[in-house]
Amino acid sequence: MSDANVRILEEARDRLAAVAAAEGLSLRGYLARLAQTLLTPAERAERAEKARAALEKWNGYAPTSAEQDVLDHELDRRLAQAAGR
């Protein structure tokens, strides 16, 4: 296994190290575990398509692209509101 150097702000490094330590992990171990839990954009798109297909099969829900855009915009708005932005 090869190592990699990643340059981030010192504050970010310290915060990640504190989170890792609280979970009983080294920063290296924490970042490796984090990397295994994150999805790539392609993986997220694949899961979204599977969910859409399951909903359509289950209850006939099949929004148009325009309807999906409206729903995506509303979700983004609500997430921003919840985050206080």
Image (cartoon, rainbow, N blue to C red):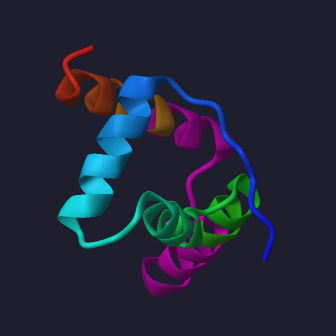
- On the image, the x and y values in percent for residue 35 come to 58, 64
User: 68 or 30, which is in the foreground?
Assistant: 30
Q: Is residue 27 magenta?
A: no
- On the image, the x and y values in percent for residue 1 come to 78, 77
Q: Quadrant of residue 50?
A: bottom right
User: 44 or 5, which is in the foreground?
Assistant: 5
**Where is 18 relative to 77, above or below?**
below
Q: How many marks?
A: 0
Q: Quadrant of residue 46?
A: bottom right
Which residue extends farthest right? 2
User: 85 or 10, which is in the foreground?
Assistant: 10
Q: Is residue 53 magenta?
A: yes
**Where is 45 relative to 17, above or below?**
below
User: 11 or 70, which is in the foreground?
Assistant: 11
Region in magenta: 48-71
- Residue at position x 26%, y 53% in the image: 19
Q: Horizontally, is 75 left or right of 5 in the view?
A: left
- Residue at position x 27%, y 14% in the image: 85
Q: Horizontally, is 42 left or right of 48 in the view?
A: right
Q: Quadrant of residue 52?
A: bottom right
Q: Horizontally, is 7 left or right of 82 in the view?
A: right
Q: Horizontally, is 21 left or right of 36 in the view?
A: left
